[in-house]
Amino acid sequence: MVQISEFKPGDRIAASSFTLEANKINEYLEAVEESSGYFTQSSLGAVAPPIACVGLAMAALLKDVEFPDGTIHLSQEIRLNKPVRVGQTFHCHGSLMQNQVRRHLRIMTIRLEVDDELGEEVLEGKTSFILSEQRNRVS
Amino acid sequence: MTHKEEQIPLEQIVPDMSLASFSRMPTQQRINLYAKMSKDYNPIHVDANYAKQTPFGGTIAHGMLVLSYISEMMLLAFGSQWLSTGWLSIRFKSPALSGKKVKVEGRVHTVERMDKKTKVICAVACRDEAGNPIIIGEAGVTMALPTIN
């Protein structure tokens, strides 16, 4: 595991791949109480919720990066370029845009890009976190 | 997609128009499920003993879980255009506490009509029961004009 604080602005995070599995989409739909009717049939080939794709992309990209306990999501930007579908495999890559310490709090911003199997970008985003610099666990 | 689209007709989208609002409740069960799905087991979300000692006093929902409510509101308002042209830029102002109601709301801010498309920008927010902001920001879509055969 790599400590997230070891990254410098401009560093690329190792690229990773993930598949939008139907069971993961179903877990997402239940967790977020999705009721739009667009995604109730999360079978193979069905359109999948874009935020589920962002969540799974972040998980894939940061799977080998260790965040301290208590890390808080500060801000999020997302741009959607095309619908994503259950069963599709995606390639995600990213880089660190900001790594700054202010009053014992570290603010980090990660850029994320997700491409489909055709190499077309389906979404991009920017995520900022606040990490405590003083201790890993509050207890 | 089998869903029959019922988004707002393009000609009815005008500045200051409210988007359909709704409420959600991120219970601990749902937070745990989101943690499983995203593999984000940060104890601030899933460990009550840990979270009790933080300034929040208890577990909080994942930011992306709460952000999904904004995405759903935009999808309901603008249909599949949201899935292929949508964007958002938001800040998490305060946490969504486990088991507490979250109200999701939006209002059309800008409508920019161009030759063959219309850009719509909305102010969006999630608030707690007291009206305090959990998420605030902007979201938008670019809507294509219907083609006439």
Image (cartoon, rainbow, N blue to C red):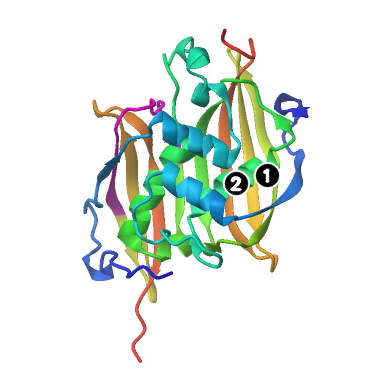
Q: Quadrant of residue B3?
A: bottom left
Tag of residue A76: none
Do marks 2 and 1 share a subunit?
yes
Q: Residue at x 56, y 44 (%)?
A: A55
Query: Residue A7 lies in magenta, yes or no?
Result: no
Residue A97 is left or right of residue B133, and the answer is: right
Segment tinted magenta in the rendering: B90-109
Residue A136 is left or right of residue B110, and the answer is: right
Q: Which residue is mark 2?
A: A56
Q: Which residue is mark 1?
A: A60
Q: Quadrant of residue B114?
A: bottom left
Q: Are marks 2 and 1 in contact (CB under 8 Å)?
A: yes
The correct choice, above or below, for B129 with respect to A37 in the image is above
Q: Position of residue A58 (x, y in %)?
A: 62, 42
Quadrant position of the N terminus of chain A in the picture: top right
Residue B28 is left or right of residue B122, and the answer is: right
Q: Badge 1 sits on which subunit? A: A
Q: Position of residue B128 (x, y in %)?
A: 29, 29
Give, as a three-letter code, the residue at label 1.
Ala
Quadrant position of the C terminus of chain A in the picture: top right
Q: Badge 2 sits on which subunit? A: A
Give, as a three-letter code, the residue at label 2.
Leu
Whether residue B92 is visible: no
Q: Residue at x 37, y 51 (%)?
A: B72
Query: Residue B94 lies in magenta, yes or no?
Result: yes
Q: Position of residue B23 (x, y in %)?
A: 27, 40
Residue A96 is left or right of residue B66, and the answer is: right
